[in-house]
Image: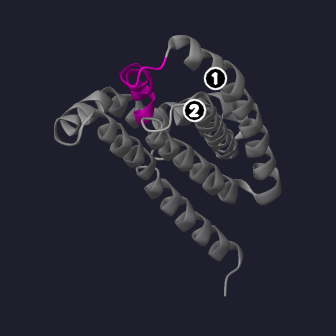
Amino acid sequence: SLFQLPNFVSGPMYNPMYVDIGMTKDMVGAVRGSFGLVGVFLGVAAGGLLSVRLGLIPALMIGGLGQIGGTMLYAAVPYFHDPVSFAVIMALDNFGIAMAGVTLIAYMSSLTSIGYTATQYALLSSVYALAGKFLKGFSGLTVDPMAEHVGRMDAYFLFFLGCGAIGIPSLLLFALLERHRRAAFNPA
């Protein structure tokens, strides 16, 4: 549940931020449909490659770092929203989210048994999304009070940094899981 929180919680605040900084729908759509899409395709390929080459837990950790980094990059958008900066940030964010998503799917698929794959995967994906779906409804309630104290743009900055940071506990849990996995396979 913690792994995808940066993506879930930050998602609802992209469009309000675009409006507040004066970005046009045409510009956002053009960047999303070009550079953003390329970032997704490259992230999917990278996530699959990492899962095969490094193993599932190391790939998850790299994917998680990509997702955290991409989310945190959005903290710069209120200050750097020219077309080039925005395209780079969106491409990197989409790359990180796609890479994290593929590594998570590969990991959750490895947890299922062959006879009940569909049912078990459906349950796993429902559980992982539950907290994020609930918490994302409170994203706007986070930005508005901060904006009263630090201003709207600084509130977005802090919000996206915080969204990225909430992904860190999942990386620590995966590091602990990998440590236990290695200890089980390499008893001293």
Residue at x 81%, y 51% (from the top left corner): 52
Q: Nearer the viewer, residue 72 or 65?
A: 72
Q: Nearer the viewer, residue 44 or 158?
A: 158
Residue 10 in the figure: left or right of residue 118: left
Kind of residue sitting beneath label 1:
Val
In the rendered structure, which segment of residues is drawn in magenta? 9-23
Amino acid on which the number 2 mark rests in the picture: Phe
Q: How far from the left and from the top, in percent, is residue 188?
A: 66, 88
Residue 176 screen position, x and y as percent: 53, 67
Q: Is residue 14 magenta?
A: yes
Q: Is residue 165 left or right of residue 26?
A: left
Q: Who's the residue at 77% across and 51% down the image? A: 50
Instruction: Give the mark nearest the N terminus, 1 or 2.
Output: 1
Count residues near mark 2 (Cα–Cα under 10 Å), then give few for <14, some for 14-19, many for 20+. Answer: many
**Number of other residues with Cα within 10 Å of mark 1, as a class: few under 14, some 14 to 19, many 20 or more:** some
> Looking at the image, do the residues carrying marks 1 and 2 touch, with CB atoms under 8 Å apart?
yes
Q: Position of residue 158 (x, y in %)?
A: 34, 45
Residue position for label 2: 86
Residue at (70, 73) in percent of width and height: 185
Q: Secondary structure at mark 2?
A: helix
Quadrant hosting residue 114: top right
Question: What's the coloring here?
Answer: one colour
Splitting the image into 4 quarters, where does residue 14 fall?
Answer: top left
Q: How many callouts does the rendering have?
A: 2
